[in-house]
Amino acid sequence: MTAGTTPAPARQCAELARKDLLLEWRAGEALLVTAPFGAVALMFVPLAVGSDVPLLRQIGPGMYWLVVLLFGVLVTLRQSAVDDQAQRAVLRLCGVSPAVRLAGRALANTVLVLTFALLLAPVAVILYDPELSGWPWFVLALPLVAVGLALLGTLADALADGLAGRTALGPLLVVPVALPLLLGAVQVLDAARYGYRPWPWLLLMLTLDLLVALAAGLLVRHLEETV
Amino acid sequence: MTLFGRRLPIAVATVAAIGLAAAMLAPPERLQGDLQRLMYVHVPAAWIAYLSFAVTLGASIAWLWRREPRFDRVAAASAEAGVVFTGLAIALGSVWGKPTWGVWWTWDPRVVTTAVMFFVYLGYLALRRATLDPMSRARRSSVFGVVAFIQVPIVHMSVVWWRALHQPPTVLQPGHPPIDHTMLATLLINLAAFTLLYLLVVRARVRLAVAEEELAARALAEGSELAGSAVSAPRLEVK
């Protein structure tokens, strides 16, 4: 491939994301296994805390975001997102930079986490019957959570790549750092319910997204280096 | 060269003894009485945790820049010390919280974010343990050492962003700190003692890491069997 025919980074990123989504479509791990597991978790919470309708209505949004966070990490660490040495070598030879590879994976993860969260939303509404007046804010918070979680998951996946305990280690690396996403998402809906504009919380999530994107963009080449 | 050295342990013991005496002699707080003396260990433990993670950040950046093993050793040693000091700060806060707040644990933002910081750096240590190849371990943990530091300003600012049970910054408050001068001096002496203790622990851990590396290199050169190799060979990554 000559320099003149090398696709632009944005095109490379889109193609890599498309490849990841195609693999996931064939494997069905995130949406056919993890999503039902998330729905089961949402169903089990009322069985654990008691089927008190006012209580469930109150804790429902929080439980929904918690399940999205915990199970969303599993979506980003799915088995179909594991590249072997040969795939990486081919991409390197084709001139695809580590940052573009990470961006492609993060884009695919964002789409999958967003889909996962959208699939679970009606389940949470049916099981918990929450207050729905703040739904426009939910629509704003959802992409911010999905992008943040996808970026953190992609970075953790790159950090734990090739390790025996990858799927156990990944969640420990992602979930504590994702605290601002959980806080922001829950507080956005709470603020909306009490009639406040939740811009500071949206800003907190956006800041975390930008910081992680910046850190990942700057540091990813160090993870890709050959020894 | 000994693990702990000679002069630094003496300095730590001396300053710690002065700090302990000062903490005992400082005036009791008007409302909490003697219970407030916990401040002289709780606050330095929390500050040293911040310092530890800042050193991990600096050493991680230095490793990514220079690729010298000593930076990786310092980053790891400092993170280990930071986890211990964070755990100590949480435990002491819990002991302080029971008589003042009525509970061992409360969902106060400062308490929760500190516990989260503890788990973030446990993740850092777990990542190091999971990676067998030294070069790969240094590379991965340096990257995570930079990202993990995001949590530290969140912990520090939590008392400003969310006003809850935990008091806002006192000493680092802009302007005149609203604390008795004797109490402030006692706190600073204990902070010095904790800082020296941190330096002692990190230096000893770095020396231990060097000794471990030399032992591993010698074992490799002699071709001796590694522990557990009869069961399965250690799987080093091939990059």
Image (cartoon, rainbow, N blue to C red):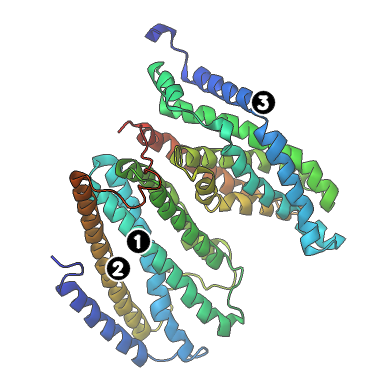
Few, some or many C-alpha atoms within 10 Å of disc 3 (few <14, some 14-19, many ≥20)? some
Of callouts 1 and 2, the N-terminal one: 1
Q: Is residue A19 visible?
A: yes
Tell me which chain the residue with mark 1 is part of.
B
The amino acid type found where label 2 is placed reads: Tyr
| Chain that bears disc 3 | A
Picture coordinates of residue A11 (x, y %)? 52, 17
Residue A55 as seen in the image, left or right of residue B94: right
Q: In this rendering, does residue A194 appear at all?
A: no
Using the rendered view, name the quadrant where residue B38 is placed.
bottom left
Q: Residue at x 30, y 89 (%)?
A: B21
Camera-side residue of B176 and A142: A142
Measured as percent of width and height from the top left, residue A19 is found at: 57, 21
Q: Are the residues tagged 1 and 3 within 8 Å (C-beta)? A: no
| Near-viewer residue (B192 or A44) | A44
Decide which of B95, B80 is in the foreground and name it.
B80
Q: Are marks 1 and 2 in contact (CB under 8 Å)?
A: yes
Q: Which residue occupies 37% across, 84% down?
A: B183
* Of the two numbered discs 2 and 3 in the rendering, the one whose residue sits closer to the viewer: 3
Give left or right: position of B38 versus B3. Answer: right
Asked where in the image residue B24 lies, by quadrant, the reply is: bottom left
Where does the image place residue B184, in percent across and percent down from the top left? 36, 80
Q: Which mark is residue A25?
A: 3
**Residue type, label 1:** Ser
Q: Which residue is mark 2?
A: B198
Q: CA distance from mark 2 to mark 3?
A: 51 Å
- The quadrant in which residue A92 appears is top left
The residue where tag 1 is placed is B52
